[in-house]
Structures are given as structure tokens and as C-alpha cells.
Image: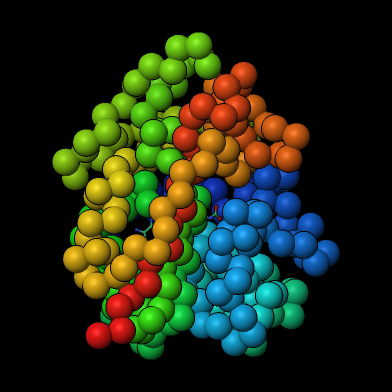
Amino acid sequence: MLDDYLKANLASWDEAVALHLSSDLYDVAGFKAGGTSLSEIELGELGPFVHEGTRLLHLQCHFGLDTLSWARRGAVVTGVDFSGEGIRAARALADDVGLSARATFVQSDVEHLPDRLSGTFDVVFVSWGALIWLGDLERWADVVAHFLHPGGILYIAEFHPYAFLVADDATPDSLRVGYPYFMYGVPQRFDEDGDYADPDARMEHTVTFEWLHGFAEIIDPLLRRGLRLDFLHELPFTVPGLPFIFLEKDVAGMLRVRGRHDDFPLTFTLKMTRERR
Ligand SMILES: C[S@@+](CC[C@H](N)C(=O)[O-])C[C@H]1O[C@@H](n2cnc3c(N)ncnc32)[C@H](O)[C@@H]1O
């Protein structure tokens, strides 16, 4: 049974799919023309571990653009998302670009995925704005460990928790804290029009529930399930998509804090390996 938080979030994500498919941010036309939606960050850090035939599980894949970008590099991919609209669009996109033979898409919330998908994977991939939608990272860590065979890799490229602490009206000169770091499992309720891909969009489903997770909350459950930390990186830039007014694009098209390009963490990435014993 979907709880009320999940139901609200699902309605919002189902509605966002059509908007994102036609947005400049996601650039589906560029992908169809042969491009990749993956940034230099994931390509540089995870790319060397993804080869022809690598079995990759993408949790919270949205409409499959990043999933299919890994398939285009040779991976055999499974994308998972709770949004039926997202999964339908992902399957259609896979057909469109001739990748459906190496791409499977499963509609499921993360928590119940072991009931709906069998097998294990070489890589579990999680990226950009996925973790804030999950209230229970203990359960999430169970799912990650369940799907990784011994020696398999978890790779995360995510917005830095610090970026979500800053108040909505903050400026680069006053980056004051507007949100709590410790949430004790209770989500923040938002009721906002617009969308990160189109701030002027008028949405029907405006209420969402989101959880900020600190580093310990993310990493500790994974360590306790036998994953070894290979690296943890913090970067002062991130991919386009965060709608905060204190950010601007740098010459490479990455977002940084206006006027303080190297001062403020906006991304973290990590790689963990499931121990062989
Ligand atoms: C920001 S997107 C994923 C990031 C991806 N890199 C992208 O932008 O295409 C977040 C995704 O999480 C999905 N999602 C949110 N809560 C979920 C849950 N509990 N189980 C599975 N999917 C969920 C949403 O449907 C959405 O597609």
C-alpha cells in the first residue's frame, strides 16, 4: 500500500514526465540524435567500470534517459521507477532508439523492488535528486545490498546535502540556513507551483514530501550491510537542475554559487563495493 507521502509524490512525478520529455533541460532530441545525458562526473567516475555486457540497475530512473545512456555504452540495463508514466515513456524511448533489447524497465517503488525483480547486478546506479524522495534509507540499503552480487558496485552522484539546507531567498552573500539537516524521518512538505525543468509551468499536483539525508544517514546503513567505501567526493559544482536563485552556470555549463565558484559543496559522489565474503 502506498502511504500518503508516496501517493502525493507519485502524482507529482507522473505529471512531470510529459513536461520533462519536451524540456530543454532533458534534451531528448539530443539523446535521440546519439548524445548522452550523463555528465562528465558519472562518465569519469563510473564509466571505467561499465563495459560491454555490464549488468546495471538504475534506481529511480525517471523516463530512462540516463539508463539508456549507459545502455548505449554497452551496459545491459534495468531501470526502476514508481511512476507508470515514467516507465511507459522509458520503454517507448528505448524502442525509438533501438535499445530495447538491452533495456528492461520495471514499475516499482524502491522499497518493494525485491518482490518484483529477480537477479543481481554488477552496478547499482543512483543519481541527481533521487535520495530526497526516500524516507527510509535503512530499507533502501537493504534493497541496494540485495541486488548487488559480491564484488558489485554501488555508485551515487547526488546533490550535496548542504545545498538543500540553504534558505529559498538566500543570496551568495548570505547563504543562511533555511531547512533542518536532521529530519528524524519526518518529511518536509512543499506546496509549490513550477518545476525544476520549467519554473513557469503550472502544475496540477503541487504538494510533495521530501527528506534531506546527511552523509551518515546515507553511508552508515550501507557499511552495515557489507559494502566497503571506495571513495567519497565533494565537488563545488553540479549538473543543471537545481532551481536555487543563488546558483549560476559556469563556462562548462555546470551550476556553481554565484561569485563563489569554488567555495560551496553542491555535489557528492561515492563508490562502494559489496564485499566478497
Ligand atoms: C529527480 S528524478 C531521478 C533523477 C534522474 N537522474 C533524472 O533526473 O532523470 C527522481 C525520480 O525518483 C522517482 N521516485 C520518487 N520516489 C520514488 C520511490 N519511492 N520509488 C521509486 N521511484 C521513486 C520519481 O518518479 C523520479 O523519476
**Looking at the image, which residue sits at the far right?**
33
Image quadrant occupied by the C terminus: bottom left
- The foreground one among 162 and 16 is 162
Give the farthest residue toward the front: 230
9 left or right of 256?
left
Question: Which residue is painted at 51% across and 77% down in the image?
Answer: 56
Image location of residue 253, percent across then percent down: 71, 39
Outermost residue toward the left in this view: 184
Quadrant for the N terminus in the image:
bottom left
Which residue is painted at 62% across and 49% down in the image? Answer: 20
- Residue beneath the point at 68% across and 75% down: 73
Q: Say if 43 sits above or below 75 in the image.
A: above
Residue 37: quadrant of the picture:
bottom right
The answer to whether residue 15 shows anywhere in this view is yes
Residue 43 position in % (x across, y down): 63, 62
The foreground one among 4 and 139 is: 139
